[in-house]
Image: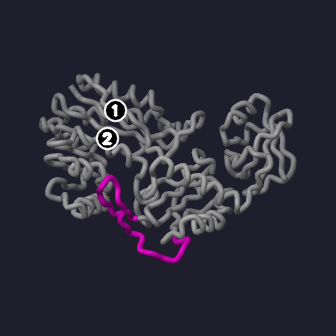
Amino acid sequence: MTKVFLKKKISRRIEEGHPWVFGNEVNLTDGDLTAGAIAEVFTHDKKFIGRGYLNPQSQILVRLLTRDKSELIDADFFYRRLLKAWQYKSQLGYRENCRLVFGEADFLPALIIDKFNDYFVIQTLALGMDLWKPSIVDALNKIFSPKGIYERNDVPVRELEGLPQQKGFLSAPFDTKIVIRENGLQFFVDIENGQKTGYFLDQQDNRRAIRHIVKDADVLGAFTYTGTFEIHAAHYGAKSVYGIDISAGAVAQANENAALNKLDHIVRFEAMNAFDVLKQWGKENKRWDVVMLDPPAFAKSRDSIQKAITGYKEINLRGMKLVKPGGFLVTSSCTNLVQPDLFLQIIQMAAKDARRTLRQVTYQTQSSDHPIVWGMENTHYLKFLIVQVI
């Protein structure tokens, strides 16, 4: 088996738990660097650290899978890991819908598996994980006997690993537009064509957090996607809910979701550019009791962090100006490159420019089925904040 020896100054970070070994952190190698093969990683002084898969085409040369010297990487390894992930999520109370595997946070780097009731969506985002896809599918079949498995590997990050973008069935074909239940509501999920894996499970706990502030309120939602926050607001007693999103397709599905829950007399959605209309409504002195913002990631790389800061500040500034005094702003950021302290600073800067005082109601992260592992910054990506705007 190929052996990888780290530089002296690098060993500590990886010894302390981080699973990524970058190519420039390696001192020397012994054996062939075959893409997708399993390699053993050692400290500079030849102490065993762990075993993982290689890819010399990637900046991340090795992604560690195990630190147990006696544990082999085989089909049974993936069965055990998936079973352990399911036991953990079940212990936290996630039975129906959850992120079964959240990559590094579930100790299966570059693997995403979302569970939508009896259907599963898989993403294998690195070559070493992609090669084990048949074993992963076999494990899912053994543990769950699912109604269907679908791969959503239509993501650009795969190309960095020398992999093609692709999507399709990993089981017998099935109707990919399904219905799931969440917090007493129902939502259509388009597994084949929806964003990411078809639905944003990472906000499922946060959607409950609005239940008190929206009662008897006029609510505005921007960047609604398929309307989950807005429909929750209507369900929790909002007087009226208006949602906007730039995607006509997302708006159509949002209106379908509202009708599915018999809440279309309270909530309606229209296709609009939030950046344009929020600014215009501010000039027109329009106001709502609650404004909810859930924008997409504004930064895909470190080079675009400043652009993300500007974008988040601008959209939150415009949102605050639309909140009645004493009302509430609900705002999120899914950009992992914008860490929590910076996100809160951005919101404070927006409040200063809007000349509004903020009183924090709650600050949360992603739902617990997307675990945060301390020491792995990329696992802590979602910031969810509710503030009273005074």
The local secondary structure at tag 2 comes to helix
Q: Which mark is residue 86?
A: none
Q: Position of residue 121 (x, y in %)?
A: 50, 62
Q: Residue furthest bottom?
A: 172
Residue neighbourhood size for the residue with mark 2, other residues' Cα within 10 Å, grouped as few (<14), some (14–19), many (≥20): many
Q: Residue at x 62, y 64 (%)?
A: 139
User: Where on the picture, by quarter, is residue 269?
Assistant: bottom left
**In the drawing, does residue 4 fall left or right of residue 198?**
right
Q: Report the span colored magenta.
A: 168-190
Residue carrying label 1:
362
**46 to 187, vertically: above or below:** above
Q: Residue furthest front?
A: 91
Figure coloring? one colour
Q: Which mark is residue 209?
A: 2
Q: Position of residue 319 (x, y in %)?
A: 25, 36
- The kind of residue tagged 2 is Ala
Distance between the alpha carbons at the discs numbered 1 and 2:
8 Å
Given residues 212 and 333, the one toward you in this image is 212
Q: Position of residue 318 (x, y in %)?
A: 25, 35
- The kind of residue tagged 1 is Thr
What is the quadrant of the C terminus in the image? top left
Q: Residue at x 62, y 60 (%)?
A: 163
Q: Residue at x 30, y 30 (%)?
A: 361
Q: Do labels 1 and 2 touch, CB within 8 Å?
A: yes
User: Where on the picture, by quarter, is residue 136?
Assistant: bottom right
Q: Position of residue 28 (x, y in %)?
A: 84, 40
Residue neighbourhood size for the residue with mark 1, other residues' Cα within 10 Å, grouped as few (<14), some (14–19), many (≥20): some
> Is 116 within the magenta?
no
So how many labels did they put on this image? 2
By secondary structure, the bulk of the magenta-drawn segment is best described as strand
